[in-house]
Structure formats: C-alpha cells, structure tokens
Image: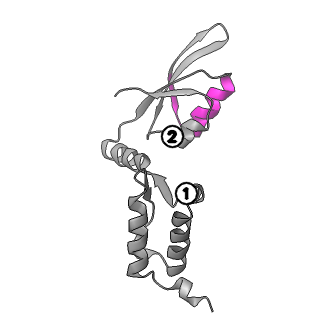
C-alpha cells in the first residue's frame, strides 16, 4: 500500500526541494537529493513548507551554512583553531565545554580561585549551536 514511499524521488520533488532551499540562505541540505526516496522527499517538502526547521536541524538533515563552510575550510587547512573562553561560573562549566568540543587547554588566567579565561585549541570550528548551549563567552582567536 505504501510501496511508493520507497521508490526513487521524482525530478519534480527534487526541484521543489531545491526551490524551497533557496529561501533558506543560512542553511544547506546534509544529504544527496539524488538518493532520497519519495517518502523522504515528501517528508522534507512538508517540513520545509511547514517551517519545521528545528526538527530538520535536530535530525541533521539541515545544517547551518556556516558549519558547512567552516568544516570545508578546516578540512582544507587542517590547522587547529584557538578560542578565548571566559565568564564561566566555575571550573566545571569550563571543563564541560572543553570536553564537549574536544578542546585542548593551552593557557589560562586565574585571580584567586576564579578563572578569568582559558585559551583552548580545537580541530574544527565550534558551531553556533554548541556555543549557544554553554553559558560562556566564546571568541575565536585569529590564526
């Protein structure tokens, strides 16, 4: 009965998705349109038309465009990136963040028992979503 869902998506579905994505300048698809099924295309079109971007981002179907660019640039250069991290409540705030981004502690400053800042190094650029999820001031340092 629902066998159509597993068939290859149509050219019209792929064209519709491409047209809808043009309106989302800050996002790009994290999948190959040529390989999706009719069912997947139907779901994607419905989500894009219904403005259910959070669900598509959560499922990593949509990724912020800058994430793709930063991923491409870090893969090309292979250079680690440095960040200045400050305004944390305690040691655990800094540690949890550094662990989440797989960062290496390079330098830090304390005043008594208070951490003023940390300089960390990571292999790839930290996404805005990760930064938003941590209660810290995080600034990328120039190379």
Q: Quadrant of the C terminus?
A: top left
Question: On the picture, is 14 further left or further right than 116?
Answer: left
Relative to 64, is 87 above or below?
above
When asked about the image quadrant of residue 136, the answer is top right
Q: Position of residue 97 (x, y in %)?
A: 60, 33
Q: Residue at x 39, y 44 (%)?
A: 70
Tell me how the rendering is colored.
Answer: one colour
Indicate the quadrant containing the N terminus: top left, top right, bottom left or bottom right: bottom right
Numbered circle sitting on residue 53: 1
Q: Give the quarter of the image for residue 11.
A: bottom left
Instruction: Place residue 13 in its image quadrant.
Output: bottom left
Residue 80: give x, y in percent of width and height: 40, 35
Q: Residues within 10 Å of mark 2 (few under 14, many from 20)?
A: few
Q: Tell which circle, 1 or 2, labels the residue nearer the N-terminal end.
A: 1
Residues drawn in magenta: 91-106
Which circle, 1 or 2, is nearer the viewer?
1
Q: Is residue 22 left or right of residue 115?
A: left
Q: Which mark is residue 128?
A: 2
Q: Position of residue 38 (x, y in %)?
A: 50, 80
Name the spot of residue 43 as percent of width and height, x first.
Answer: 56, 72
């Amino acid at each position: 009965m629902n066998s159509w869902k597993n068939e290859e998506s149509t050219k019209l579905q792929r064209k519709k998705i491409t047209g809808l994505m043009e309106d989302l300048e800050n996002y790009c698809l994290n999948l190959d349109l040529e390989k999706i099924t009719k069912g997947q295309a139907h779901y994607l079109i419905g989500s894009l038309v219904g403005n259910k971007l959070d669900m598509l981002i959560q499922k990593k179907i949509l990724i912020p465009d800058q994430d793709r660019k930063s991923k491409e640039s870090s893969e090309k250069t292979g250079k680690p990136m440095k960040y200045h991290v400050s305004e944390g409540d305690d040691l655990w705030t800094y540690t949890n963040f550094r662990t989440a981004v797989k960062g290496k502690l390079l330098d830090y400053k304390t005043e008594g028992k208070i951490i003023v800042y940390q300089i960390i190094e990571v292999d790839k650029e930290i996404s805005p979503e990760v930064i938003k999820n941590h209660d810290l001031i995080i600034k990328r340092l120039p190379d």
